[in-house]
Image (tube, rainbow, N blue to C red):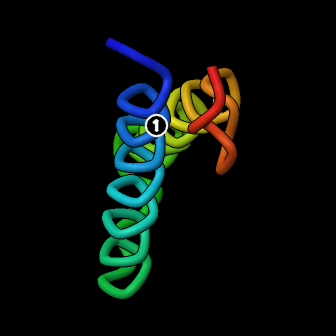
Amino acid sequence: MNNSQTGALGLFFMVVAIIILGINAIFGDLSKNGFFGFMMLIFLVGLVLFWSSGGFSSNKK
């Protein structure tokens, strides 16, 4: 897996975590079973993948 694929995967993780957190915030069951912390963990994993691959300038080797 090259840098652009890693960055895209990280971005995907971040977007999915934000969307799921937004849906849960609307329905107001955010505090159940540590779900918020789990989504934050997925978000942080996505962020680390994204930045370690070079962020938005990942086209350079």
Q: Residue at x 61, y 36 (%)?
A: 58
Residue at the front extreme of this rendering: 60
- Camera-side residue of 28 and 55: 55
- Camera-side residue of 22 and 28: 22
Which percent across, then down, holds residue 11? 46, 48
- Camera-side residue of 44 and 50: 50
Does 48 appear above or below 15?
A: above
Q: Residue at x 50, y 35 (%)?
A: 46
SS for tag 1?
A: helix
Dot 1 amino acid type:
Gly
- Quadrant assignment, res 1: top left
Does 33 appear above or below 1?
A: below
Does 51 appear above or below 55?
A: above
Which percent across, then down, holds residue 51? 69, 32
- Quadrant assignment, res 39: top left
Left or right, 44 with respect to 54, comes to left
Q: How many marks?
A: 1
- Quadrant assignment, res 4: top left
Left or right, 47 with respect to 39, comes to right
Q: Residues within 10 Å of mark 1 (few under 14, many from 20)?
A: many
Residue at the bottom extreme of this rendering: 26
| Residue of label 1 | 10
Left or right, 58 with respect to 36, comes to right
Q: Residue at x 45, y 63 (%)?
A: 18
Quarter that holds the C terminus: top right
Q: Residue at x 35, y 49 (%)?
A: 12
Does 56 appear above or below 1?
A: below
